[in-house]
């Protein structure tokens, strides 16, 4: 089935050939007529021309031009209307799929079986890729926020259903969420809750790896009761409280780190060491670390594990 563009091109070709032919004939006739015409008797010449075959050809040419102009405008209007209908159909289909997946991601009734989390996240990632408006992208982010709250016990946000204990997320779910985070970072579809969750999960895995490899690091605990920390680890026989913080803008890191240390000092013991881990460089000078008995460390990837290990030992040494 030809598209509107092909139809318009075919119609243009059909009209172009006869129009050119008529134009050439009329032009030749007018040229011969004007050369042989008695311009002094202009009125008689016009009467003779009106009764000639050239006048009929000229009228046909004029009618053809007018008809072609009208058809061209009609085709343009039809194409614009068709494009609008296609856009509207795509938008309706997008919202229909979004409503389907969001309704099944977190069913309103407990007896309903939810869609597998991995499938939900992957579908939302695809929807965010083909979304045509900021509203659609923000809608995807909202569902991802809700899923993140229920995806596992490491998140600092309370679950949507307090009576339900969230299972530890499996690797496929984490991989799907990580893919969504990376695909939508810096867009209206970005979820700060998901970004924080994925970052915290990666840091904790690095801490576990370091604890397993370094005999001076022991007894890693995740979210210990009443510690006010994401993790606690024994370093050289001394306890170090760890808080993992992330932000989209590095200018907020300084205030975030100092506020976290303040809370640590309010809740923790005088013998505790404090470590704040962020994706950005530490805002603390060495003299501030000594005064606060706290260390801030940058971690972005497992390649930073060595500097994270050094920060753990430094935090412990400040309280020796």
Image: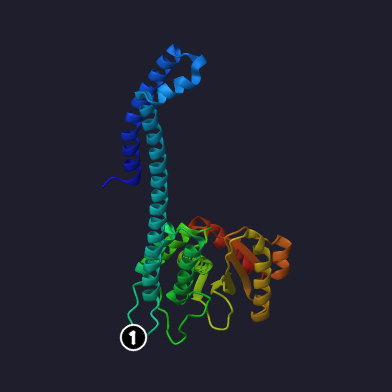
Query: Residue 189 location in percent, x, y?
Result: 49, 62
Q: Which residue is mark 1?
A: 111
**Closest to the observer, 61 or 70:** 61
Query: Residue 175 location in percent, x, y?
Result: 40, 63
Which residue is drawn at the image coordinates 35% and 36% (left, top)?
12
Q: Is residue 22 above or below residue 175?
A: above
Which residue is drawn at the image coordinates 37% and 85% (left, top)?
110
Q: How many marks?
A: 1
Which residue is drawn at the image coordinates 55% and 61% (left, top)?
308
**Closest to the observer, 50 or 318:** 50
In the visual, does 219 lie left or right of 168? right
The answer to whether residue 170 is visible is no
Residue 117 in which image quadrant? bottom left
Colour pattern of the rendering: rainbow
Query: Residue 186 location in percent, x, y?
Result: 53, 58
Q: Residue furthest left?
A: 1
On-image quarter of the C terminus: bottom right
Q: Residue furthest top?
A: 36
């Amino acid at each position: 089935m030809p598209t509107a563009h092909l139809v318009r091109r075919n119609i243009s070709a059909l009209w172009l050939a006869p129009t050119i032919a008529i134009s050439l004939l009329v032009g030749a006739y007018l040229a011969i007529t004007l050369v042989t015409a008695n311009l002094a008797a202009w009125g008689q010449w016009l009467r003779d021309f009106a009764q000639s075959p050239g006048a009929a050809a000229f009228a046909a040419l004029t009618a053809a031009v007018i008809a072609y102009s009208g058809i061209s405008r009609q085709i343009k209007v039809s194409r614009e209307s068709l494009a609008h209908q296609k856009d509207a159909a795509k938008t309706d289909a997008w919202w229909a799929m979004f409503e389907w997946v969001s309704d099944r991601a977190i069913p309103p009734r407990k007896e309903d079986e939810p869609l597998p989390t991995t499938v939900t996240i992957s579908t939302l990632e695809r929807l965010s890729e083909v979304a045509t408006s900021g509203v659609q992208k923000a809608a995807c982010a909202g569902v991802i926020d809700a899923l993140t709250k229920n995806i596992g016990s490491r998140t600092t946000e309370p679950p949507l259903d307090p009576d339900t204990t969230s299972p530890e997320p499996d690797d496929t779910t984490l991989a799907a969420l990580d893919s969504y985070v990376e695909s939508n970072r810096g867009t209206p579809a970005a979820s700060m809750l998901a970004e924080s969750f994925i970052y915290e999960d990666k840091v904790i895995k690095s801490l576990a790896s370091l604890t397993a490899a370094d005999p001076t690091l022991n007894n890693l605990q995740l979210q210990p009761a009443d510690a006010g920390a994401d993790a606690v680890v024994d370093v050289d026989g001394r306890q170090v409280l760890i808080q993992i913080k992330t932000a989209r803008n590095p200018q907020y890191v300084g205030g975030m780190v100092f506020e976290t240390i303040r809370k640590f000092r309010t809740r923790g013991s005088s013998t505790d060491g404090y470590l704040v881990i962020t994706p950005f460089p530490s805002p603390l000078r060495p003299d501030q670390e000594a005064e606060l008995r706290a260390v801030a460390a940058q971690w972005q990837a497992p390649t930073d594990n060595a500097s994270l290990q050094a920060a753990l030992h430094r935090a412990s040494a400040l309280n020796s």
